[in-house]
Image (cartoon, rainbow, N blue to C red):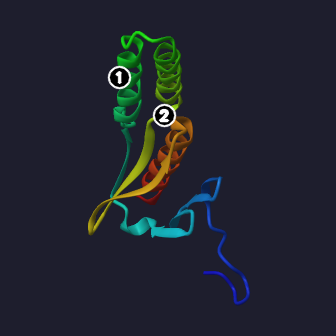
Amino acid sequence: MPLRGEEMQEHEFFRSQNVLVSQTRFVTFGQTYAMSGVTSVKASSVSPSRTGPLVVGGIGVLCLFAGSAGALIFGAILLAIAALIWVGQKPEYFVSLSVASGEVRALKSKDPQFIGDVIQALNECIIARG
């Protein structure tokens, strides 16, 4: 039991980019979750929608077959734009927590390594809690 005026040192498992995982709490961009209420954690991901680049590319292909020089150039530009959009899209990765009220996506990032590090820290915290 700490003496008056002394605080118990809270063990931190992870701290980076506005995210903290400690023995008692998981803080992510202003939202705090009590670790005592977290029963499990998992990583998940969502692939980006490819509808936009497919539509732009489809219009570009139609322009290529239009026959005129202006349509050919416009079609090539649209195909290049579609390719850039496609390559630039990255999946989103999530930290999902199982809590009493169900499952909640607590954190998202386009960096899978960052999400993996947070998941590892949360699992270490749950194991240490016992």
Rounded to the nearest angstrom, the CA distance separating label 2 from label 1 is: 21 Å
Point out residue 2 in the picture as x, y percentages from the top left corner: 65, 81
Q: State the count of labels.
A: 2
User: On the picture, is 51 further left or further right than 90?
Assistant: left
Q: Is residue 100 above or below residue 55?
A: below
Q: Amino acid at mark 2?
A: Lys
Q: Which mark is residue 104?
A: none
In the figure, 88 relative to 40: above or below?
above
Q: Going from the N terminus, do you reach mark 2 or mark 1 first?
A: 1
Of the pair 75 and 51, the residue shown nearer to us: 75
- The quarter of the image holding the C terminus is bottom left
Image location (x, y in percent) of residue 9: 67, 69
Please state which amino acid type lies under the numbered disc 1. Answer: Gly
In the displayed structure image, the side of residue 116 where residue 44 appears, left or right: left
**At 38% from the left edge and 39% from the top edge, which residue is drawn?**
45
Q: Position of residue 94 (x, y in %)?
A: 42, 47
The residue labelled by disc 1 is: 58
At 35% from the left and 22% from the top, the residue drawn is 58
Dividing the picture into quadrants, the one containing residue 43 is top left
Q: Which residue is mark 2?
A: 90
Residue at horizontal 40 percent and vertical 9 percent from the top: 67
- Name the image quarter holding residue 10: bottom right
Give 42 or 62, whichever is nearer the viewer.
Answer: 62
| Crowd rating for badge 2 (residues with CA inside 10 Å; few <14, some 14–19, many 20+) | some
Foreground mark, 2 or 1, reads: 1
